[in-house]
Image (cartoon, rainbow, N blue to C red):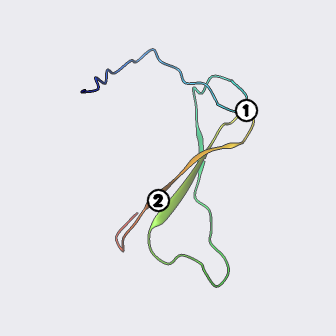
Amino acid sequence: MPVTITEDHDLVPLCPHCNQSLNVIAATTPVAQGSSAFKFGKRTVYACPSCRKALGISQRKGFWAG
């Protein structure tokens, strides 16, 4: 069964932790430390600006990620 995806410009998602509206999402790029520090790729952590809990982490792999 195919899934239909529609674009909704009025949709404001809610934080799953504190239920506040997510009009803005905070993002940071962590600095790796230690012997297992990543040398390639780029990681970004996304968080709710109200409760500061993590919403997700993205990773761009590869030598030229930037």
Place of residue 2 in the rendered image (x, y in percent of width and height, measured from the top left):
24, 27
Does residue 20 appear to the left or right of 41 in the view shown? right
Residue at the image position 45 percent from the left and 74 percent from the top: 40
Residue at the image position 52 percent from the left and 61 percent from the top: 43
Residue 21's place in the image compared with 34, above or below, is: above
Where disc 1 sits, the SS reads loop
Residue 21's place in the image compared with 38, above or below, is: above
Where disc 2 sits, the SS reads strand
Name the quarter where the N terminus is drawn.
top left
Place of residue 26 in the rendered image (x, y in percent of width and height, measured from the top left):
61, 42
Q: Say which mark, if any, is on residue 39.
A: none
Type of amino acid under label 2: Gln
Mark 1 burial class by Cα count in 10 Å: few <14, some 14-19, many 20+: some
Does residue 44 appear to the left or right of 9 in the view shown? right
Does residue 57 appear to the left or right of 2 in the view shown? right
Mark 2 burial class by Cα count in 10 Å: few <14, some 14-19, many 20+: few
Q: Say which mark, if any, is on residue 59.
A: 2
Place of residue 27 in the rendered image (x, y in percent of width and height, measured from the top left):
58, 47
Q: Residue furthest top?
A: 10
Q: Residue furthest left?
A: 2
Q: Residue furthest bottom?
A: 35
Type of amino acid under label 1: Ser
Quarter of the image for residue 19 reads top right
Q: Say which mark, if any, is on residue 50.
A: 1
Name the quarter where the C terminus is drawn.
bottom left
Residue 32's place in the image compared with 21, above or below, is: below
Which one is in front, 15 or 27? 15
